[in-house]
Image: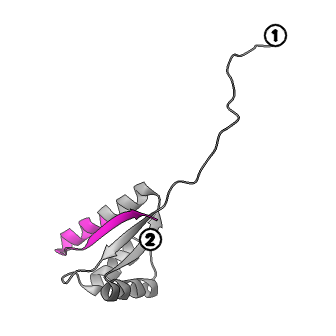
């Protein structure tokens, strides 16, 4: 069998990095119920009931809390999904995404 040659150079200096992480932040408001915030945290962010209650109280007392840390596309998707669910229920719940 004949050997074939190639003119393709291999790049030996490939540096892989972990994707940047982003926090999804829940913000307090005077209208969204505590029960609904717990529901969002358990359904969308997969928190246990106990952890969801702790985060909900942190949002209530401190004005905001981190619901989770994800890659950018997942963080944005979860924030949009949570706000969409809130609008369907008539709540003005606000979530933001910021670099961790």
Residue closer to the observer: 81 or 28: 28
Res 43 quadrant in image:
bottom left
Instruction: Note whether 16 is above or below 52 in the view shown.
Output: above
Q: Distance of mark 1 from mark 2, alpha carbons?
A: 57 Å
Res 28 quadrant in image:
bottom left
Query: Magenta part of the protein: which range?
Result: 81-100
Residue drawn where x is 33% and y is 74% of the image: 26
Instruction: Note whether 77 is above or below 42 in the view shown.
Output: above
**Residue 62, how many percent across, how many down?**
34, 85
**Residue 20, how many percent across, how many down?**
50, 56
- Of tags 1 and 2, which is closer to the observer? 2
Label 1: few (<14), some (14–19) or many (≥20) C-alpha neighbours in 10 Å: few
Residue drawn where x is 19% and y is 75% of the image: 91
* Disc with the residue nearer the chain's start (1 vs 2): 1
Label 2: few (<14), some (14–19) or many (≥20) C-alpha neighbours in 10 Å: some
Q: Which mark is residue 63?
A: none
* 55 relative position to 6: left or right: left
Q: Which mark is residue 68?
A: 2
| Secondary element at tag 1 | loop
Q: Is residue 82 magenta?
A: yes
| Secondary element at tag 2 | strand
Q: Is residue 17 magenta?
A: no
Residue drawn where x is 45% and y is 88% of the image: 50
The type of colouring in the image is one colour
Q: Which mark is residue 2?
A: 1
């Amino acid at each position: 069998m004949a050997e074939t040659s190639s003119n393709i150079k291999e790049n030996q200096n490939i540096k892989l990095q972990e994707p940047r992480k982003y926090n999804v932040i829940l913000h307090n408001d005077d209208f969204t119920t505590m029960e609904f915030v717990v529901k969002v945290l358990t359904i969308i962010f997969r928190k246990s009931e106990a952890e969801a209650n702790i985060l909900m109280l942190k949002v209530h007392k401190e004005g905001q809390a981190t619901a989770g840390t994800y890659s950018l596309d997942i963080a944005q998707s979860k924030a949009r999904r949570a706000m969409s669910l809130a609008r369907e229920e008539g709540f003005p719940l606000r979530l933001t995404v910021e670099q961790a």
